[in-house]
Image: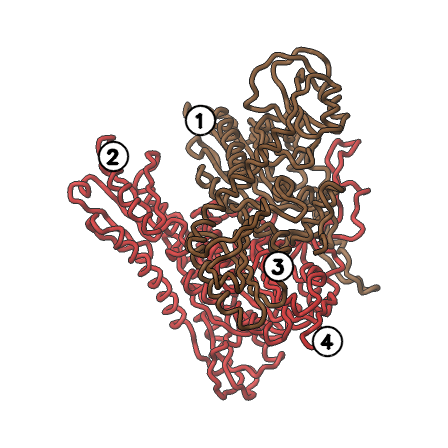
Chain colours: A brown, B red
Amino acid sequence: MAKVLTSKEDNYAQWYNDLVLKSGLAENSAVRGCMVIKPYGYAIWEKMRDELDRMFKETGHENAYFPLFIPKSFFSREANHVEGFAKECAVVTHYRLKTDEETGEIVVDPDARLEEELIVRPTSETIIWNTYKNWIQSYRDLPIMVNQWANVVRWEMRTRLFLRTTEFLWQEGHTAHATRQEAEEETMQMVKVYAEFSENFLGIPVLVGNKTESEKFAGAVETLTIEALMQDGKALQAGTSHFLGQNFAKAFDVQFTNKEGKLDHVWATSWGMTTRMIGALIMAHSDNHGLILPPRVAPIQVVIVPIYRGNDEFPPIAEAANKIKAQLTALGVSVKFDDRDTQKPGWKFAEYELKGVPVRLAIGPRDIENGTVELARRDTLEKKVMPQKGIATYIHDLLEEIQQSIYQKAINFRNANTHHVESWDELVDVLENKGGFALAHWDGSKESEDRIKETKASIRCLPLDAEPEEGKCVVSGKPSLRRVVIAKAY
Amino acid sequence: MAKVLTSKEDNYAQWYNDLVLKSGLAENSAVRGCMVIKPYGYAIWEKMRDELDRMFKETGHENAYFPLFIPKSFFSREANHVEGFAKECAVVTHYRLKTDEETGEIVVDPDARLEEELIVRPTSETIIWNTYKNWIQSYRDLPIMVNQWANVVRWEMRTRLFLRTTEFLWQEGHTAHATRQEAEEETMQMVKVYAEFSENFLGIPVLVGNKTESEKFAGAVETLTIEALMQDGKALQAGTSHFLGQNFAKAFDVQFTNKEGKLDHVWATSWGMTTRMIGALIMAHSDNHGLILPPRVAPIQVVIVPIYRGNDEFPPIAEAANKIKAQLTALGVSVKFDDRDTQKPGWKFAEYELKGVPVRLAIGPRDIENGTVELARRDTLEKKVMPQKGIATYIHDLLEEIQQSIYQKAINFRNANTHHVESWDELVDVLENKGGFALAHWDGSKESEDRIKETKASIRCLPLDAEPEEGKCVVSGKPSLRRVVIAKAY
């Protein structure tokens, strides 16, 4: 059949875009920079959301919902935050349209100008801390462990489906604590939740570490990040958890009476993961045939395609298919029996390869005679004929094997593309020719970091698990006590 | 203890507002007309959302996500729709803020004016049908059965928590069909899903019927509604399902090749239910002690309160409580064991009455001696001492009984407050003195309907199950073939 995707090797960016469109995940909308998340893409987001939500609740969090709009003045309250967030944003200035009496057209009613402009939230620290002020008086009101599932808007000039869109979906956790230590522990707990989710659920290995001063969240004392490696050798920041210190409590005057009866400002964290993660999922595993989805995040884990001619051959095939479907469903496996007669088997095979369904079963007349079924694995493209008897249990176990295999493949890829570099030339060679993560000594100075940024790469993180190691900064030659991770990034 | 709520009899509106605030459901935010949905309120919304989502998927729908913003010009395309929706809305005119060089303040950057203003979606028919245009070529692409969970904004001058807020959460279904009949069947199917959800899940009986021409959705051919009766005798429109004919397909030029090979415009429906339903839930069941939640929608179905003095008495009580909790959890009942030592039992009793937890268990030292537990039903306020043995099964069954009992009570209330009226004077008497639903003959004319609206009441619906009955319009005296439902409404 005709190739529907540009190959990864020819043009990775084009392959990505083709794949998002052709597999039915998302498309651009009539509104610049805003995407439409199509049903198949949204089904993946639902799986991710449900799993994250479960993990959040298990770690003691509740959901709530705060306003879409934030008064402009709120952004000015936290000095660093305003620099980072109040610039490229959607500004609501009016609350009414009217019909122009001369032209008959719909125009903005100049009489309906807002006294204070409203910003469509790019992130919700300000409105939430303004709310927490009324919720917190005493240490007894703490901690507050709240998460919000919401849409946010950041006006982006160059957008790419999932990876960078003007509007995107995300969750943002916002917690309030009585002590610095508790808030720091929460920051660490949540970045570990993200790492676990990324590795165990999405099969994407990540490095966990601190951001540098220049890369941290606007308004944070410290930002922890998980960094994943994409197939083209670029890094992708996949989730961040921020220790906000008392910055927002001070900006919004949120004080509490502590156990000793003294007034103190509240300690804060925030943490978020977005629909961008769907982009990471695609770029971590997929191939030139289409998506490769780890079974845990796949909306359809098994598809059954009947192969027959004429109406006589169909009934026994349908019977066998429905029996296997029922067995799989009973084991908690999601199955689709695609019995449409409007499409041919070959078209369906290509379609489900494109959509990344982990296991495909094909059943034809000969399978009915022999009590067999043809099983194809999406990740390896291996096919084999199997007895129908016992197939459900086999597939149930196979899905777990596929989950692990996809993850292991991504780890192997990352290992093969992680380079210890000892000099500036070696660093540039990795960034410009090899791709991947460069582990390099850095002296901790802004000057050296700026020099690295000139290569269009950046320090992705200071890994938490880095071994202490004496060395020399690849930029300045000054002493350094551990390596950092440098890469070009999405 | 001190009464925390204004009584319903003194001031129903104040009682409602007190209850929303004091039970921790929601509060007003710093942004005019926008609410903060607090964790307990959001937990109720999650229960509602999950159940509706299950019902939508069971009836063949998928979720997707469309942009928050809609280009202004889109609204002008459907003549009636623009009248209804493009007026009171949030208008985004700029995409950047900047620091004013003179004052140092954050101001809107005049250079960042959008070429075309964007409207924050008040409803998404226009942007969705503009998208469907690219999805639909042939009858093979139909039906499209899509739902979206989203926030929407309608600029309201007078707002009330949940009932009428500038921003609210909802779901909006948007389906596309090859035939008029199929779209009409879908419209009917979804209003029935809403009715079933309202009655079986929320315990709120509803009338299902058609809206009049003047009350239907802007852009619809026909609107079906479910109408509930609140305790103060006012109606509340709790969900609507619209047959849109080919209006939006024509406005956005969405044509398809039908089975006969001819081009035709696509047939459409849309249907929605919102966070307003939480307001209905409150006003259908609650009392002067607080919320009364039907068990199916209650985030906590059973609370266990330990009653003890000193640390010695606590361990055996905790042991018994945790045992009962484990038994209930195994039966699928959600239980909270409130073992906080920062609050006294009396405070906890009042708190969970306020929050509407259906069943409360109290366990004290004497219960440990006797193997008993005190069980209190929130809906009837009945208390009795029960043996611990078998209590979990008893409660499991009791929750179902409470669900039915709350529903039956609401039905009885509605029956007692539904009045057949035969004349204008009788109608006015119901509307002004008795409250409730008035069943009256109406001649079908706009003039008579306008006269009814002058009483500040409206025709809520033309019930689907109304028996044909000859009579005379209570306004004009002209002949009428069936009764309509008239009431004041939220």
Q: Which element is circle 1 on? A: loop
Q: Chain of mark 1?
A: A
Q: Which mark is residue A348?
A: 3
**Count of picture labels:** 4
Q: Which residue is mark 4?
A: B262
Q: Which residue is mark 2?
A: B314
Is residue B450 at all visible to an observer of this figure?
A: no
Check the image and report above or below for A38 versus A165. below
Q: Are marks 4 and 3 on the same chain?
A: no
Q: Amino acid at mark 4?
A: Lys
Choose top left, top right, bottom left or bottom right for residue A8. Answer: top right
Q: Which mark is residue A258?
A: 1
Q: CA distance from mark 3 to mark 1?
A: 64 Å
Check the image and report above or below for A137 versus B399. above
Q: Are marks 2 and 3 on the same chain?
A: no
- The label nearer to you, 4 versus 2, is 4
Q: CA distance from mark 4 to mark 3?
A: 27 Å
